């Protein structure tokens, strides 16, 4: 089709990189006795068959929405309905179709537009379901400039490379649905607004990017990669603190629970601790909140 596909060997894709600490698992709360066997099992999962590689490559190709380089202007979901200045309902599809046609010099049928949009979205979902098996090929295409659709709010970049990046990001920054609220900032223990950590940075920044992060953490299992990214987010939230108990139950405790869930997925015995924190959240038990996370008396 349009994708620039280069030769690639799956088994050797994620190589080199080492931690700066002697026991990287212990550095963010992972039981090394459990993590090492899990990592060994995960290494086998990262080796995909030729058929699986072909499937992944086909899905990446399906992320292409239109010919040419990305315009980095919103590609509107055809299902969204807006109102014009007179209050009359109008589908965004028609507006965006006209914009694309003007940019490309092409005529676009609304249903054909919808089909291409939904194909991109479906490919993104299927790539996510493949977990770490898809990472090497997603990394390979991080620089691809082909036009895709937008996969994150308030970010205009919508190339295939952007889509591959956000696919990895969403998988590893596995935030629970009951964590945080819409908006750029929140109030901290100091009573001042702070940018939310996931807007201010990513867990990949210190490594130099997602490709470098994956190389440095190649010995971690998939759930332990999630734990590390979630721990980065939790540490940032704890540094901001909470102005009151409700903020703690929204911005901090859900992350602590999700981390334990992913550690459990990795085979760690954390069921008792996990049940305790779920009960704390359910009952909004303020006695559980660490004093240092709240405003000083």
Image: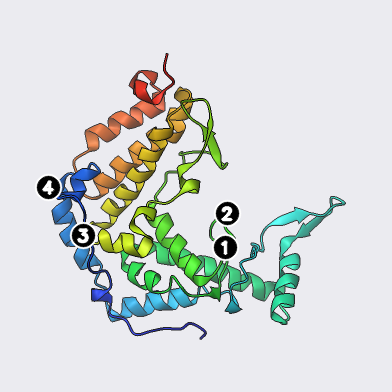
Q: Nearer the viewer, residue 38 or 229?
A: 229
Give the mark nearer the N terminus: 3 vs 1.
Answer: 3
- The residue where tag 3 is placed is 18
Nearer to us of marks 3 and 1 is 3
Task: Pick whichever of labels 4 and 2 is earlier in the sequence.
Answer: 4
In the image: residue 114, left or right of residue 143: right
- Please, what secondary structure does the residue beneath circle 2 have? loop
Check disc 2: other Cα within 10 Å, few if <14, some if 14-19, many if 20+: few
Number of other residues with Cα within 10 Å of mark 3, as a class: few under 14, some 14 to 19, many 20 or more: few
The alpha-carbon separation of the residues under discs 4 and 3 comes to 19 Å
Q: CB atoms at circles 1 and 2 under 8 Å apart?
A: yes
Q: Residue at x 64, y 70 (%)?
A: 114
Disc 3 from disc 2: Cα separation:
33 Å
Q: Earlier in the sequence, mark 4 or mark 1?
A: 4
Relative to the observer, which residue lies in front, 193 or 57? Answer: 193
**What colour scheme was applied to this rendering of the protein?**
rainbow
Q: Which residue is mark 2?
A: 153
Q: Give the residue at mark 1.
A: 150
Picture quadrant where residue 233 is located = top left
Q: Secondary structure at mark 3?
A: loop
Q: In this rendering, is residue 82 above or below 136?
A: above
Could you say where residue 119 lies in the image, as x and y percent from the top left? 54, 71
Q: Would residue 267 be seen by someone viewing this image from the given angle? A: no
């Amino acid at each position: 089709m349009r994708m620039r596909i280069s030769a690639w060997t799956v088994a050797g894709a994620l190589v080199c990189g080492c931690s700066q600490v002697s026991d990287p698992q212990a550095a963010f709360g992972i039981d090394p006795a459990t993590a090492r066997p899990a990592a060994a099992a995960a290494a086998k999962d990262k080796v995909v068959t030729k058929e699986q590689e072909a499937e992944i490559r086909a899905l990446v190709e399906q992320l292409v929405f239109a010919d040419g380089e990305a315009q980095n202007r919103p590609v509107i979901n055809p299902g969204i309905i807006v109102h014009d200045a007179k209050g009359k309902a109008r589908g965004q599809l028609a507006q965006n179709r006209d914009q694309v046609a003007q940019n490309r010099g092409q005529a676009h049928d609304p249903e054909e537009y919808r089909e291409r949009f939904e194909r991109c979205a479906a490919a993104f979902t299927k790539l996510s379901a493949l977990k770490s098996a898809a990472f090497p090929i997603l990394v390979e295409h991080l620089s691809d400039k082909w036009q895709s659709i937008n996969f994150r709010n308030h970010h205009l970049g919508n190339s295939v490379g952007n889509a591959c990046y956000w696919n990895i990001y969403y998988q590893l920054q596995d935030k629970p649905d009951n964590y945080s609220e819409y908006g750029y900032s929140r109030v901290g223990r100091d009573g001042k607004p702070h940018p939310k950590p996931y807007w201010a940075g990513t867990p990949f920044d210190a490594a130099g990017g997602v490709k470098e992060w994956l190389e440095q953490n190649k010995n971690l299992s998939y759930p332990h990669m999630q734990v590390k990214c979630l721990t980065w987010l939790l540490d940032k939230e704890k540094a901001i603190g909470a102005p009151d108990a409700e903020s703690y139950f929204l911005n901090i405790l859900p992350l602590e629970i999700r981390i334990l869930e992913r550690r459990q997925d990795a085979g760690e015995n954390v069921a008792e601790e996990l049940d305790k924190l779920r009960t704390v959240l359910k009952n909004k038990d303020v006695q559980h909140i660490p004093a240092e996370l709240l405003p000083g008396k």
